[in-house]
Amino acid sequence: MSPNSKTAKGLSSWDLLWVDPELPGENQLRSFLLEDVPPTEVLITGGCGGLEPNFPCALALYANEILDPRLGPHLPQPTRALSLKAVQKALGSEVRAGKFLTTEVPCVTPSHKQESGHGYGAIAVDQDSAVLCRPCIELELGHAVVRFVLDPMEVDLSPKAPGRDAALFQGARECEMGIYSLISRL
């Protein structure tokens, strides 16, 4: 997503691009960024798994660093409009900052989330932040990653976990509201 038009606040000033997870999303974003009038900055957002105890659903998390176990660390290059301070001001609530982990395998059980968090020093896990940062780096675009906790560390989203579907639906709904709140106020 990118704020192409700075004249108006809110959703009308953003180009929204919904991408598929993992590698298809990287190619979709790269194609979008190579269009005739490319954006000057990109906000990568969505849901994530919380890797710290007591991170509530829908808590905003800001990536200072993104670790891709295959490709190593990446430090996002936020513009002033997408800085941690700007995100905190836009949301008017707590935003935690730290390292994100991008994995190919979903982290869905509390024990897997806890191991990943401690093993990598990460506060969040997702499957595409590092992948979506690559085209931004290649094209030298300012970019930031802000994710909202879809599933706290204590929540089990494994396929046969009791209440999984309800937890997933509720988490997705709360993340969606966080995303729209953020982009409507930046």
Image: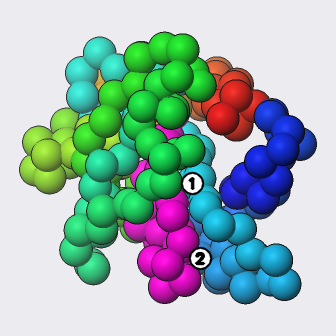
Q: Where is residue 2? Give x, y as percent.
A: 70, 57
Q: Is residue 142 magenta?
A: yes
Q: Residues within 10 Å of mark 2 (few under 14, many from 20)?
A: many
Can you say which quadrant of the picture contains the C terminus?
top right
The type of residue carrying mark 2 is Glu
Residue highlighted by disc 2: 26
In the rendered image, which quarter contains the N terminus?
bottom right
- Which residue lies at the image location 57% right of the left edge and 54% below the top edge? 44
Q: Residue at x 80, y 34 (%)?
A: 9
Q: Residue furthest front?
A: 7
The circle on residue 121 is: none
Tag 1: amino acid: Ile
Point out the frontmost of discs 1 and 2: 1
Q: Range of the magenta residues?
A: 126-149
Identify which residue, 135 or 172, lies in the foreground: 135
Contact (Cβ within 8 Å) of mark 1 with mark 2: no
Residue with the mark numbered 1: 44
Residue 31 visible from this viewpoint: no
Classed neighbour count for the residue bearing mark 1: other residues with Cα under 10 Å, few (<14), some (14–19), many (≥20): some
Q: Which color scheme is applied?
A: rainbow
Label 1 to label 2, Cα distance in Å?
Answer: 11 Å
Badge 1 marks a residue whose secondary structure is strand
Residue 50 x/y as whole percent: 36, 33
* Residue 55 inside the magenta-drawn segment: no
Would you place residue 180 above or below residue 19 in this image?
above
